[in-house]
Amino acid sequence: MNIYVDFDDCLCETARSFTEINRRLFGKHVPYEEVKFFNLKDSFRLNDEEYEKLMVEGHLSKTLLSYEETPNASAVLNDLMDQGHSVSVITGRPDSTYEDSRRWLDEHGLSRAKLYFLNKYGRDTFYQNGSFNLELEDFYKMHFDYAIEDSPLAFQYFENFPDLKVMVFDRPWNQDCDLPANYLRCKNWKQIQTEINNQGQ
Ligand SMILES: [Mg+2]
């Protein structure tokens, strides 16, 4: 089977790291549990200048490489790859983060996972024609059986994959979504593993 996995807040604890950056840079204390909007500008109540500083800090090499792994992400994905499944990490990060993102995966035992950059959020104005960049039309030609994603903004793309089973990684900012029948909210990677293994039988 082919498995789509989002990077931030599926493989690693990006939002938790951003809450610490927000506190360090601006003295604002917004705990992870209160990150109710995917847009951190809204969740942290930042002005444009603060938001830009937050994003710059969050995309530094030392920050990107320091993100904590979401518990069991690597172990479960390696188990799935050992069974012969294909794992593609498809991230909405800017493609300037390719080397650090690839390094993070490699350092966390995920060297076998493929890595692609897809402009999911319309944020990046400088996407290049690299081998790791996906245009939407190329993305839609791919085939996936499962998708693991936390962002409500990315769900729209899954309408193009009618047979896809979507696993919504449970996060404070996706609590209010009405999920279609082919979506399943998952609390952690162990649950994702159980679901995929049960379906495969
Ligand atoms: Mg994400």
Image (cartoon, rainbow, N blue to C red):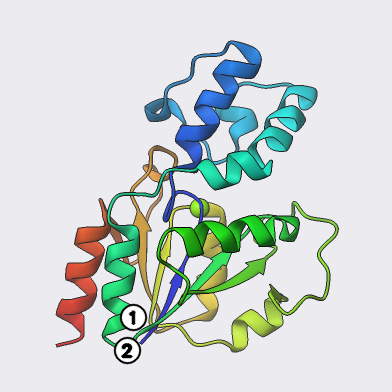
Report, in whole angstroms, how far the alpha carbon at label 2 lies from the one at label 1: 5 Å
Residue drawn at x 46%, y 31% as measured from the top left: 35
Front one among 162 and 56:
56
- The image quadrant of residue 160 is bottom right
**In the displayed structure, would residue 39 be above or below residue 137?**
above
The C terminus, quarter of image: bottom left
Mark 1 lies on a secondary structure that is helix
Q: Are marks 2 and 1 in contact (CB under 8 Å)?
A: yes
From the top left corner, tell me how far across and down residue 123 is, in percent.
75, 51
Whether the residue under disc 1 has CB within 8 Å of ligand 1: no
Q: Residue at x 35, y 87 (%)?
A: 1
Label 2 neighbour load within 10 Å: few <14, some 14-19, many 20+ = few
Judge whether residue 79 can be spotted in this image: yes
Residue at the top extreme of this rendering:
27
Q: Is residue 169 above or below residue 54?
A: below
Question: In the displayed structure, would residue 141 be above or below residue 191?
Answer: below
Three-letter amino acid code at the position of disc 1: Met
Where's residue 72, x and y in %? Answer: 27, 56
Left or right: where does residue 63 sit relative to residue 35?
A: right
Where, by quadrant of the figure, is residue 185 drawn?
A: bottom left
Q: Secondary structure at mark 2?
A: loop
- Residue 81 is marked as 1
Res. 128 mark: none
Q: Amino acid at mark 2?
A: Gly
Mark identifier at residue 84: 2
| Quadrant of res 63 | top right
Residue drawn at the location 39% of the way across and 84% of the way down: 163
Residue 39 coordinates in the image, percent (x, y): 60, 38
